[in-house]
Amino acid sequence: MTTTAVLIKRNIKLFFKDKGMFFTSLVTPAILLVLYATFLGNVYRDTFTAGLPQGVTLDEGIIGGLVGGQLISSILAVSCITVAFCSNFLMVQDKVNGTIKDLRISPVKPATLSISYYIATLISTLIVCFVAAGVCLGYVVAVGWYMRVSDILYLLLDILLLSFFGTALSSLINFFLNTQGQISAVGAIISAGYGFICGAYMPISSFSDGLQKAISFLPGTYGTSLVRNHALGGVFAEMEEQGIPTAVVDGMRDAIDCNLYFFDEKVQIGEMYLVLGVSVVVLVGVYILLNTLKKKV
């Protein structure tokens, strides 16, 4: 077994052995689902019905599918990032307890060490997020199921790519953390703030024009939109088949950020994937470079 594989196995085992980190990352999506369904479900429902033109009505199943799709897309878009940060705190804990010093004076190359942390965090994040996706899909079945097989496959792809992005972002930020207090502070900031700036808690379309333009530069925004598109693609298709005017459907897409605009230019799905993919490559490259340049201690 190679050194990288040994380190990856070690990091994954430590993450799942640490009940605090593991249960925090696992429980977070479940708590969000309960809170969203309890407090935001009716808000989303009222928003969808109030936005319909006079004379246009939707049956309860479609409204349930709309609400469920928006809820799970918000949860999964946030969880892929917050879970990655929880999983990656092991890297900081190794600094706190001095383990990193032993690893750095060993023959292990800095690049190998950084890659092992990244891959282990990614695997742990994917395990938790795919389990969360299963729970979320179960919720959609209960409230209004219109998702197609292709929607589910694309949704899983979105989770995979967002987990790559979340792991890369957390790796780069955690590189600069050295204490338990910093872990707690960053964890709180990410948990509270990321959902707002990526459009998960509140649609970007509800922000001011200036803030919308600023947020359009953030890769996480496009990750949220991808998850939204594939969580709601089936129900939008059903609405069109039932004769709901295309203008009404497009208006809903705009209102909940399925359609995103970069300085008034609509961003296509392929372009969203490109933004996320390039962001992952850049973040991982910078993270590995920083570890390589860091002097052994």
Image (spheres, rainbow, N blue to C red):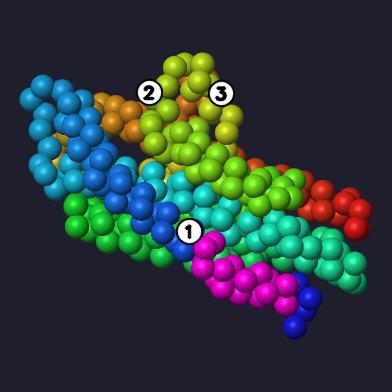
**Which amino acid, by three-letter code, is at mark 3?**
Ala
Residue matched to label 2: 206
Calculate the distance from the C-alpha at mark 3 to the C-alpha at mark 2: 14 Å
Of label 3 and label 1, which has the lower sequence position? 1
Report x, y in % for residue 283.
Answer: 70, 46
**Which quarter of the figure has residue 98?**
bottom right
Q: Residue at x 60, y 43 (%)?
A: 186
CA distance separating discs 1 and 2: 31 Å
Determine contact: label 3, label 1, CB under 8 Å: no
Task: Give residue 24's mark.
Answer: 1
Residue at 31% across / 59% down in the picture? 137
Residue for badge 3: 214
139 vs 257, left or right, is left
Amino acid identity at mark 1? Thr
Instruction: Tell me if residue 229 is in the magenta stretch.
Output: no
Chain part drawn in magenta: 6-22
